[in-house]
Image (tube, rainbow, N blue to C red):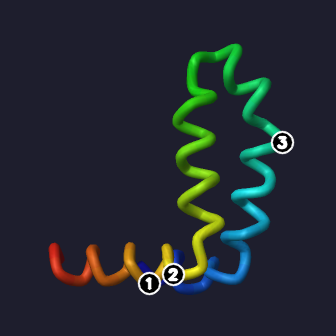
Amino acid sequence: MLALQAGRPLMLVAGQLLWIAQPALSLLGTGKQAGQLAQLLEKPGAADLLLNFLEEDG
């Protein structure tokens, strides 16, 4: 959870990098999952939702 909080400002950049890598990842069969993860990372409140989910489960 600490890594997620620290990396929150970089989530948008990570999402953009996944969009760039998606064609290459499609060759490995993981392009669809990369696109879904990229969409999640680009949502403004995604980190907060994930942190809340982890805190409730933990």
Q: How crowded is mark 2: few (under 14 residues within 10 Å), some or many (20 or more)?
A: few
Percent of width and height locating residue 28: 64, 16
| Residue for badge 2 | 45
Secondary structure type for disc 2: loop
Looking at the image, residue 8 lies above or below residue 31: below
Looking at the image, residue 29 lies above or below residue 6: above
Q: How far apart are marks 3 and 1 (CA)?
A: 25 Å
Secondary structure type for disc 1: helix
- Image quadrant occupied by the N terminus: bottom left
* Label disc, if present, on residue 22 of the rendered structure: none
Q: Residues within 10 Å of mark 3 (few under 14, many from 20)?
A: some
Name the residue located 62 percent from the left edge and 81 percent from the top edge: 8
| Residue for badge 3 | 20
Name the residue located 78 percent from the left edge and 66 percent from the top edge: 13
Q: Residues within 10 Å of mark 1 (few under 14, many from 20)?
A: few
Name the residue located 56 percent from the left edge and 31 percent from the top edge: 32
Residue contact at pointers 1 and 2, CB within 8 angstroms = yes
Secondary structure type for disc 3: helix
Q: How far apart are marks 1 and 2 (CA)?
A: 5 Å
Give the amino acid at mark 1. Asp
Percent of width and height locating residue 23: 78, 26
Earlier residue among tags 3 and 2? 3
